[in-house]
Image: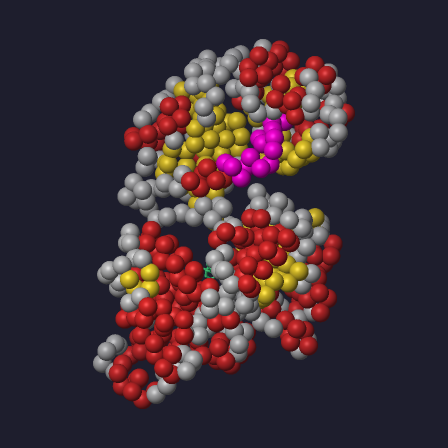
Amino acid sequence: MVQVADITGMEGTTGCGDASGIVRLDADLGITYLDAAAADLIGIPAESLLGCGLDEVADLSELSTLMRSGTVFNNQVLQVGKRRLVCDFLPTMESEQLVGGILSVLRLLPEQLPDPSIDLRALLQSGSASLDLNYDGIVIVDREGVVVMVNQAFADILDTTPNAIIGKHVSDAYPNSQSSKLPAVMETATPQIGITHYLNGKQVYASLYPIVKDGQVIGGVGKILFKDIREITLIANRLQGASETRAAAGNVARKESMSRYDVNSIVGQSKQMQDLKESLLRVASKNSNILLLGESGTGKELFAHAIHAASNRRYAQFVKVNCAAIPEHLLESELFGYAEGAFTGARKGGQLGKFEQAHLGTIFLDEIGDMPLYMQAKMLRVLQERELTPLGSNAPKTVDVRVVAATNSNLEALVREGKFRQDLYYRLKVVTLCIPALRERKEDIRALSINFIQQFNEEFGLEVQALSLEARDVVMHYDWPGNVRELRNVIESAFNVVTGPLILKEHLPEQLSRMIQDGSSGIPHDIGPYLRARLGSKPLPAIVEEFEKLLVEAAIEFCNGNKLQAADLLGISRQWLYKKLQKKHNDDSSGH
Ligand SMILES: Nc1ncnc2c1ncn2[C@@H]1O[C@H](COP(=O)(O)OP(=O)(O)OP(=O)(O)O)[C@@H](O)[C@H]1O
């Protein structure tokens, strides 16, 4: 909620003109980057601020709780010494975890707080001059919903003058526009942050707050954050350019930015990939569900991110759920959430499910083929009716979510075997994108290798140029059962041993040349010499672990990438298989 003091922040801006500054924070509110305007507004040199905790230099009080819990806020006052700064905060989420955020330092307030006892109209009238200087459109209504103040920027959006709006009820003050949500915001005393709204036929991005004084709602304020939704992309690009983190100050690991993946992140010049990228861009802006098919490691998750980034849901959450990795009995509460007291050990206040977290955004259901039948029935209801009921609750909730599902199983076969509901299958496959295996588009290997070499050059601080001709020959002849993920891992492992500008054949994992000689299977051709060569080279558990990895790979290959069948074949549970794969993935990434 906006306290009266915050509204007065729109009055008398001082000092620093219109320049607002940007501060990038990590999850502990450590300052990882700030621009010159921010340092100027804060009044402390940037060199002294970098690496400090924001709470060491500013009195955050309850803002600290909001920031640490990943809550967006706008126009809040931050005290740094004697300075009072008006700030917005946008959290940065990564795999549903808070990894930091962007603090926009908007302006400096005068040091004296005005007397909070004056009433809304008087308070606002005294601020009218500076409201007009404000670039962001602002409208303020009284408790009855009558517009008492509007600035020129807001009137400009409506192609009218402030006087033509002031005095009217907000419900019919705007021509050619969606009905204002300010009455609802005041009624519920609950802000609506970052909503899209149509004003004068244009889609704007706004936040609405109740104005509260002495515990009473005395009015409401609407602030246009972006009067053209495309402005957000420009800002996102600006922030992406400012990629400095504590790592730059010799500290802390790299954090991924919110807009890390888009269609340009998908590398591949083959006809198949060009066509797929075109289809992706065509379907992204629609709301249809999308089914992504392809073997493990072909880039399904990358595609899902790119779909989200190319859709107009991109400013809401992208939420990933791996249906196979979540134990069956937890899947429902994970997806739909639960009410307080739904079961023993349930959190106080209940828990939001992934669908609700993805409201207005995209949910990516990975390994959908592994979803148990009873959950498939519930999923169908969400897809058909856009409604779900959290566990232990009897109040259905409406959700607006775009579903992107992915699998490397043959869903049609699962439907025939009665393991996957046909009706759900038809609902999901409204648009199907099949990503071909890497061995079916070997012409992409070169561009992918160059792309990964560039990525790892940055990460490892090296200047590798390319693969040698001989190494290129090996990668071109290899079958790539693990697809692009395996190629990426192979290049990464080469970076651990390369010494010059070229990755040579001997820098590639021995397994690669061996598999080419042996045919395709990961299992060594002649098991006797393989085992004997290992005896004495490592302790028994390490040999057993290596062999186990090969068997897991062979089982997945044998089952054409279907991990559920592979787990059956190995006589282990899906979860266990996933643990093994996760471990393998971690080992591969760390070059073991
Ligand atoms: N066309 C591509 N261009 C660049 N990187 C790619 C491409 N395809 C895949 N990758 C990279 O390969 C790795 C594996 O991709 P991703 O996780 O999207 O595959 P997946 O099909 O979802 O795998 P799984 O089925 O095992 O979950 C990621 O690091 C991804 O960024």
Left or right, residue 420 beside residue 462: right
- Viewer-closest of 403 and 579: 403
Residue for point 54% across, 68% down: 436
Q: Position of residue 155 (x, y in %)?
A: 66, 21
Instruction: Examine the image and state in which quarter residue 80 appears.
Output: top left
Please report the bounds of the magenta region as a residue range.
222-235
Question: How is this picture coloured?
Answer: secondary structure
**Could you tell me which quadrant the C terminus lies in?**
bottom left
Judge whether residue 282 is colored magenta: no
Among the 4 quarters of the image, the one containing residue 28: top left
Which residue is located at x 36 percent, y 66 percent?
490
**Farthest residue, direction right:** 172
227 in the magenta segment = yes
Q: Which one is nearer the viewer's eye here, 464 or 523?
A: 464
- Horizontally, is 15 left or right of 281 in the view? left
Q: Name the image quarter holding the N terminus.
A: top right
- The residue lying toward the viewer, choosing from 155 and 172, is 155
